[in-house]
Image (spheres, helix red, strand yellow):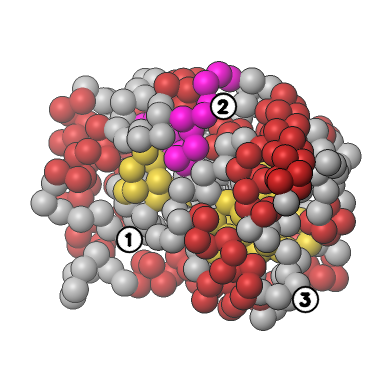
Amino acid sequence: MSLKSSICDVFGIEYPIVLAGMGGASTPELAAAVSNAGGLGVLGAAACQPEQLREWIQRTRSLTDKPFGVDTLLPASVRRAAQKGAGEGEDPMEALKGHMAFAQSFMEREGLEKYTAPARNESGSNLQVFSKEFFDAQMQVIIEEKVPVYAAGLGNPGPWMEEFRYNGTRVMAVVGAVRHAVQVASIRLDAIVAQGHDAGGHNSPVGTMALVPQVVDAVGDIPVLGAGGISDGRGVAAVMMLGAAGAWIGSAFLAAEESGILPHQRQAIVDSTEEGTVISRSVTGKPARIIRSKWTDAWEQADISPLPMPFQGMVSGQVMAAASRDGRADVNPGFAGQGIGMINKVRPAREIMEDIVASAEATLSRATYFI
């Protein structure tokens, strides 16, 4: 059975496999490798300064002549989170001081020295990450570069749809609830990603198996990609049997040779089991699935709560950077989904794609036989 669906026609790809836009991991090299192998590679560009984002898009084009996408966050979703504050009547900026002291104490206890960022060159941007100006500048680059596909990792891309349509850009959005799917369906997206609780990074409180068919039923003829805990072709087949037109896959490609994560983080993926992740707000301020670490444990045990996005990122950023510099997988092992127990070695992205496709086709053939 050939692995084909309507999503292949929508994006102009060979197989209905889409690389999740994972920040720090889904670089031009990984995105291009997935696209060259017949899927849709997506750049994880949420934290890219505009100059870097333009360079990434152009570099991806130099590595593949196939369609690819760009994934970012959208302003409204982050502004709403920030406006909620740290708690009832609490000013996030005031609370930030105490949280920074907590982070400093943690670094001293773990023997982590302050991270000194490399000096910016003359073209470096001074835009604050996750500011309104930052988002506006990112979206301007994406529109100017006329990328083939845009994915909203958080939020509604509605305000930019006219320009996307003019450029011929296909658009999708990641959702974690049926109500969110209905909201974005109203702007006539090309595809919707239903990402369940099993997924790495920011995800839904609803499990993948429950979420996917309900989103499929709610959005009519808009193709849905299933996401969350899918690490091989059996997972692809499963979400397609639930009505999805394909899969949005992240963690399986974290262990790719082309992945942008650090060597100690790749090893953490290989070494972890299905029980190795936790849902924590300790890195970004939003609930996210991450490999358990001394940092996540410290926040679980503390009598203070993480701040909302983007403030918690200011707290965790220094710690994560120092841990990455020092190769400390026990502090910053990275985000990952519950399917990582099936990942046992680092391989080229093409080999991962080939195995996923072959396994999905075999599984679907068996399912057809029993039907």
> Residue at coordinates 52% horizontally, 29% vertically from top-left?
342
Closer to the N terminus: mark 1 or mark 3? 3
> Residue at coordinates 56% horizontally, 27% vertically from top-left?
255
Task: Measuring from the top left, give residue 152's x and y in whole percent.
Answer: 61, 61
Task: Measuring from the top left, give residue 261's x and y in whole percent.
Answer: 53, 30
Marking on residue 255 = 2
| In the image: residue 37, left or right of residue 75 | right
Closer to the N terminus: mark 1 or mark 2? 2
The residue under label 3 is: 162
Closer to the N terminus: mark 2 or mark 3? 3
Between 205 and 63, the residue placed more toward the observer is 205
Q: Amino acid at mark 3?
A: Glu
Mark 1 closeness class: few <14, some 14–19, many ≥20 residues within 10 Å = many
Helix, strand or loop at label 3? It is helix
Marking on residue 308 = 1
Task: Measuring from the top left, give residue 84's x and y in whole percent.
Answer: 31, 72
Helix, strand or loop at label 2? It is loop
Distance from disc 2 to disc 3, alpha carbons, whole Å, reads 37 Å
Q: Amino acid at mark 2?
A: Ala
Instruction: Determine contact: label 1, label 3, CB under 8 Å.
Output: no
Does the magenta-highlighted stretch encompass residue 258? no
Q: Quadrant of the N terminus?
A: top right
In this picture, which residue range is highlighted in magenta? 332-346
Does the magenta-highlighted stretch encompass residue 342? yes
Mark 2 closeness class: few <14, some 14–19, many ≥20 residues within 10 Å = many
Distance from disc 1 to disc 3, alpha carbons, whole Å, reads 31 Å
From where the camera sits, is residue 213 visible?
yes
